[in-house]
Amino acid sequence: MPAPAQPRTGTLIVGNCQAGVQIASTLRELGDTERITLVGEEPHAPYQRPPLSKAFLKGEATADSLAFRTHDFYREHDIELVTRERIVTITRDETGGVAVAESGRTFPFARLALATGAVPRTIPFEGSELEGVSYLRTATEATVLEQQLRQATNVVVVGGGFIGLEVAAGARAAGKNVTVLEAAPRLIGRAVCEQTSEFYLQAHRRRGTRVVLNAKVVRFTGEHDRVTGVELGDGTVVPAEVVLIGVGVIPRTELAGQLGLQVDNGIVVDTHALASDGLTVAAGDCANMPNPSIADFGQGRLRLESVQNAVEQAKVAAATLLGQAAEHKTVPWFWSDQADLKLQIAGLSGGHDQVVLRGDPDSEKFSLLYYRDGILIAADCVNSPLDFMAVRNALHQGQSVPAALAADSSLPLKKSVTDVLLPVPSPAA
Amino acid sequence: MPTVTYVAYDGSETIVNGFAGDSVMETAVRNGVPGIVAECGGSLSCATCHVFVCADSAGLFPPRADLEDDMLDGTAVDREESSRLSCQLKLTDDVAVHVQTPETQV
């Protein structure tokens, strides 16, 4: 006799992560009283990921200390938190559906939210299976990396992006010999302009980290199943007991694919976080949403990897699940702490046609402001929180700072913020 | 055990038991207290954990460092004399802290 069908009620959120927790919290804040289940494969209650490449590796944080919420919070808000269950299949129709975990456990739902995140992009170098070669995304991986780093003398980081450079800076500060291998001609090429890349190159070198640009990794060398070095295209071998690979992430869209949702560099959603079936919502690193920061709003889409993006999209997704209208309108911002350098980025610099330098990079305290058609669109701020706050707030208000005033660092940016004067349409001929 | 009373913009109060060593921000976020966002998780990058420290609690914390002071210039609701970033306010044994949260953080 078949088991009685479980009732398809409440919301199932797939992904024990920043976006997942926020969807659950916001549902309750908005007055939802139905069942909420938050399910994910990691063994820990959901925790902050950004410190994994920073404080965690210094031994100053644990998965517990980074937990977003107490267990009491989940209990008191009647949110069922399920860990160690990896959802492998989902089926649904207009009234709900069921998700099935690898263990066979089933999770019926009336409403579905995907916060499936992303996984590190892997490169199949020869020797990738050697002990000491790792990626960094989860607290479990960070725990292993922290132990390996403690015993290492030589550390190689493959990939000069935020994660790689944060780990490199921490390892260097702990006295390791650190080499960063970047395949591109400059560091952090995906996120910042050439001047900022150049500054970080010099700043890491000043601190004793070896940085190789245009690096070609051939293979990882090893002995007794442990990594011993990284062989480069010119035949040299950089010694290493620890190799961290940080070359970006890939959004997890397998479940979205099963549901027949449109997928294109992430789960394609509208400004309400609604996927192409008009039923399922998605938020965070896995979601590709129209972004108002892009000039051709309505066409331009972005998949962002940031805390703020996960939180804001999750709030919108929760409202959408309850049939309320909300839109994601905040100015994107990002941060990266490398050694004693605090980088804060406000806005998106893509499509800029002018860059204004404010302050002196040699003092390690400066900002680069990006303009398009004379209007401020973004800024990279190094150890310059006042500039960052001024730009973030100006962009949020739809305001600008005249480029001619921005370069004068004796003048607070906040004082130079002006309304954007839209060109007056010329009278019809 | 330290306690923190969060008074929201609408006057509603939430009282939470905290732990010595945790910040006023962490205590709020872990317990889902509304009114504190804390996007950066306490790394002094976002200024979305702004609070006004009530007069009776003002003496419980060391003064602002320069970076906190700079970040307070960019809060969503303008700073006042009693403004702090709550990620910088560490609880100590048995203190009773009272803070007000602003109307908005972003």
Image (tube, coloured by chain):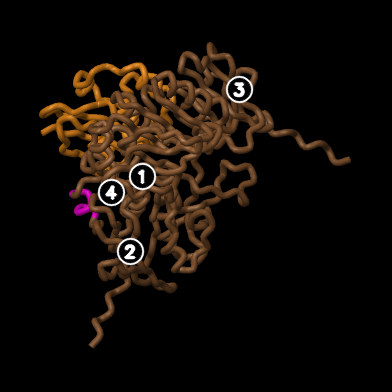
In the displayed structure image, the side of residue A65 where residue B51 appears, left or right:
right
Quadrant of image for the N terminus of chain A? bottom left
Q: Residues within 10 Å of mark 1 (few under 14, many from 20)?
A: many
Q: Secondary structure at mark 1?
A: loop
Which residue lies at the image location 47% right of the left edge and 14% below the top edge?
Answer: A363
Q: Quadrant of residue B9?
A: top left
Q: Observer-nearest residue: B13 or B39?
A: B39
Q: What's under tag 1, amino acid-wise?
A: Tyr
2 and 1 marks in contact (CB < 8 Å): no
- Find numbered disc 2 in the image and state the secondary structure of the residue it sits on: strand
Amino acid found under the numbered disc labelled 2: Ile
Question: Quadrant location of the C terminus of chain A?
Answer: top right
For disc 1, the marked residue is: A135
The residue stretch that appears in magenta: A72-77
* Mark toward the start of the polypeptide (2 vs 4): 4
Q: Is residue A257 left or right of residue B8?
A: right
Measured in 3D between alpha carbons, the distance from the residue under mark 3 to the one under mark 4, in whole angstroms, is: 40 Å
Rendered location of residue A181, percent (x, y): 45, 34
Mark 2 — on which chain does it sit? A
Labels 3 & 4 near each other (Cβ < 8 A): no
Element on which disc 4 rests: loop
Q: Chain of mark 3?
A: A
Q: Are marks 2 and 4 in contact (CB under 8 Å)?
A: no
Kind of residue indicated by mark 3? Val
Vertically, is A95 above or below A187?
below
Q: Which residue is mark 2?
A: A87
Label whose residue precedes the other's in the sequence (3 or 1): 1
Secondary structure type for disc 3:
strand
Chain A representation colour: brown
